[in-house]
Image (cartoon, rainbow, N blue to C red):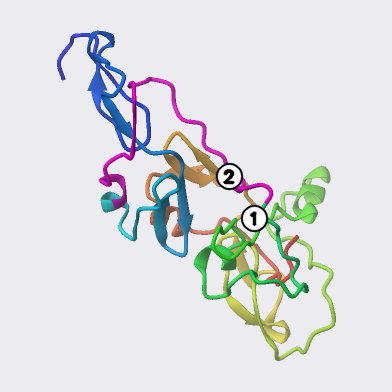
Amino acid sequence: MEKGGAVRCQRMGCDAMFTEDNNAEDSCRYHDSPIFHDGMKEWSCCRQKSHDFSLFLAIPGCKTGKHTTEKPVTKSVPANPQKPVPLPSAAQNKKPDDSCSRCRQGFFCSDHGSQGRPSKPSVVAAKKDDHVEQAAAPPVKKIVDLNEPQICRNKGCGKTFKEKDNHETACEYHPGPAIFHDRLRGWKCCDIHVKEFDEFLSIPPCTKGWHNADAA
């Protein structure tokens, strides 16, 4: 690499090397924040999308401006806070889709209106007793048919299960939270970070517990 004071632009979609002497107002082409849903990667600014992460990053930026060394601030909250979030029992137009990998694993999904779910309080309570326990206490459940197939909402699981087969080590999941920062994504619970979202979804769960179809 040349040693002329050149630094790398931190805007999403740019990643070019620049110097302050060569940084015109329209020298940088970049994107706003990305959206990940159902295996698809999409730019929120121009709605261009791709299943392949390398092709997604290669989409030319739709905005222009000056290069910058300031890292973009990424948030794991919905981009549109006034968007109504449906309750599981409410009859609304949008609801979590069990065929969507993000909905199944408890992440925020812009397509289906599902909200990300925080870690279960039972895990925190277990840490207060000086006992290191991997298994979470069984959640309080509504009355269901023991043979009725349900979708586990624990992050990192998303498997279909029957209550008759549920037990304290049936589910492998991440208590979280998920971390998205500086183009890396990972889990705080097991301190593993990767660059591609598909790799993030493939990080092996670090905790065992009960399947939970009503993770809160």
Picture coordinates of residue 153 (x, y %)? Answer: 65, 67
**Please, what is the dominant secondary structure of the magenta stretch?**
loop
Q: Quadrant of residue 70?
A: top left
Q: Quadrant of the C terminus?
A: bottom right
Please tell me whether residue 102 belongs to the stretch shown in magenta.
no
Q: Residue furthest left?
A: 2
Task: Residue under label 1, please give it.
Answer: 116
The type of residue carrying mark 2 is Ser
Can residue 157 be seen in this snapshot? no
Left or right, 181 with reference to 89: left
x then y, percent, for residue 149: 65, 85
Disc ID at residue 76: 2
Q: Is residue 57 above or below residue 120?
A: above
Pick the residue in front: 194 or 56.
Answer: 56
Q: In the rendered structure, which amino acid carries the disc numbered 1? A: Gly
Q: Residue at x 22, y 13 (%)?
A: 22
- Residue under the image location 61 percent in, 48 percent down: 80
